[in-house]
Image (cartoon, rainbow, N blue to C red):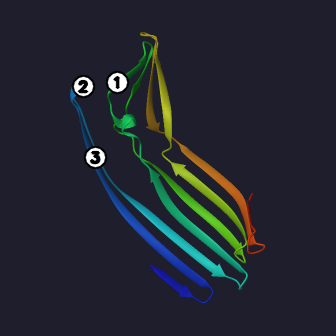
């Protein structure tokens, strides 16, 4: 939904996603099921201070699904001493994004952003001494946080010359 009051405007949204996945690995007689609901909210708040300046604060949640190879529990031999095993219990990784943006006359825009990813995909490596082999598999492990500051400048100097920079 959206609404505007004075110098403020607000826009929100919510996506609901149901995931139901089943697998049957015939060669190894392995069955697995994943069944879960995910919520993906978004929100945009804009404050128009005057004709030249506006501030925008926004939030969203995103996901990245694992590749099929990472889910399939089949053993894939890379070399005589290393192999990969898929993880059927692997879940998507979810990222929360927040961004604060200042816009001056539509020409100079500064942005501060922050994101935090939960259930980050990580390669887990296990070494088996008895067979002198290494086994790798993807797991959801830990979090990752990132932040950034950026600036954009854009101006039409003449009918035929437009300048745009990013820093």
Q: Mark 1 points at which residue?
A: 75
Q: Left or right: 53 with respect to 125?
A: right
Query: In the drawing, what numbered circle is on residue 28?
Result: 2
The quadrant where residue 48 appears = bottom right
Labelled pair 1, 2 in contact (Cβ < 8 Å): yes
Mark 1 vs mark 3: which is more N-terminal? Answer: 3
Q: Quadrant of the C terminus?
A: bottom right
Q: Quick one: label 1, few (<14), some, or many (20+) residues within 10 Å?
A: some
Residue 130 drawn above or below residue 74? above
Labelled pair 2, 3 in contact (Cβ < 8 Å): no
Residue 150 drawn above or below residue 20? below
Q: Where is residue 139 in the image (x, y as percent from the top left)?
A: 44, 36
Mark 1 vs mark 2: which is more N-terminal? Answer: 2
Most extreme residue toward the bottom is 6
Which secondary structure lies at badge 3?
strand
Q: Left or right: 7 with respect to 16?
A: right
What's the CA distance linking mark 1 and mark 2? 9 Å
Q: Name the residue under label 3.
A: 21
């Amino acid at each position: 939904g959206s609404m505007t009051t004075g110098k403020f405007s607000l826009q929100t949204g919510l996506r609901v996603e149901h995931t139901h996945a089943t697998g049957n690995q015939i060669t190894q007689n392995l069955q697995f099921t994943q069944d879960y609901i995910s919520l993906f909210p978004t929100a945009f708040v804009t404050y128009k201070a005057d004709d030249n300046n506006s501030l925008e604060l926004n939030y969203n949640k995103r996901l990245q699904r694992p590749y099929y190879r990472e889910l399939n529990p089949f053993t894939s031999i890379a070399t005589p001493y290393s192999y990969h095993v898929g993880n059927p219990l692997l879940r998507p990784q979810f990222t929360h994004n927040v961004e604060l943006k200042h816009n001056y006359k539509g020409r100079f825009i500064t942005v501060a952003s922050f994101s935090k990813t939960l259930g980050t995909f990580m390669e887990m490596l296990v070494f088996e001494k008895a067979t002198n082999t290494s086994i790798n598999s993807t797991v959801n492990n830990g979090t990752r946080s990132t932040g950034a500051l950026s600036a954009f400048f854009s101006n039409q100097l003449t009918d035929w010359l437009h300048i745009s920079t990013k820093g």
